[in-house]
Image (tube, helix red, strand yellow):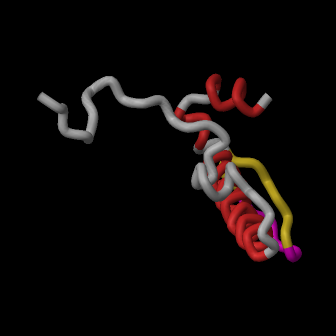
Amino acid sequence: MIERTLREWTIADLAKTYRHTWNGDVYAISRQWTIWRILTHDVYHGGQLSLMLGMQGIEHFELGDLFGHITLPTLSDLGSSQPKEE
């Protein structure tokens, strides 16, 4: 659902707002703000999990060795950072 939505939305769609009440005040929240808020929230908790698992000696491959990536990014075909052997 999330992937489909992000593929379908245009840049203009990100500026659309909805009403949200918090602490008695009504805010006009944009879709862009909501996505950013969710991402930063997840990054924060990913860091907490990584720290707690590491302190207990529990392997946390995705959060540690892969630096938060579930899969490695695709290697570039534009050349290697390693010098070529002649």
Pick whichever, 52 or 29, lies toward us: 52
Q: Which quarter of the rendered picture does the N terminus lie within? A: top right
What x and y, as percent, mark residue 61?
69, 51
Image quadrant assignment for residue 80 = top left
Which residue sits at x=63%, y=52%? 68
Pick whichever, 20 or 3, lies toward us: 3
Q: Which secondary structure is most common in the magenta stretch?
A: strand
Q: Which quarter of the rendered picture does the C terminus lie within? A: top left
Which residue sits at x=25%, y=29%? 79
What x and y, as percent, mark residue 10?
56, 29
Image mark count: 0
Magenta run includes residue 72: no
Image quadrant assignment for residue 7 = top right
77 is higher (above) or lower (below) than 69: above
On screen, residue 24 versus residue 74, left or right, reads: right
Magenta run includes residue 25: yes
Which residue sits at x=76%, y=76%? 55
Image quadrant assignment for residue 51 = bottom right
What x and y, as percent, mark residue 75?
42, 30
Q: Which residues are magenta?
A: 23-28
Q: Residue furthest left?
A: 86
Q: Residue furthest front?
A: 86
Pick whichever, 29 or 78, lies toward us: 78
Which residue sits at x=75%, y=33%? 2
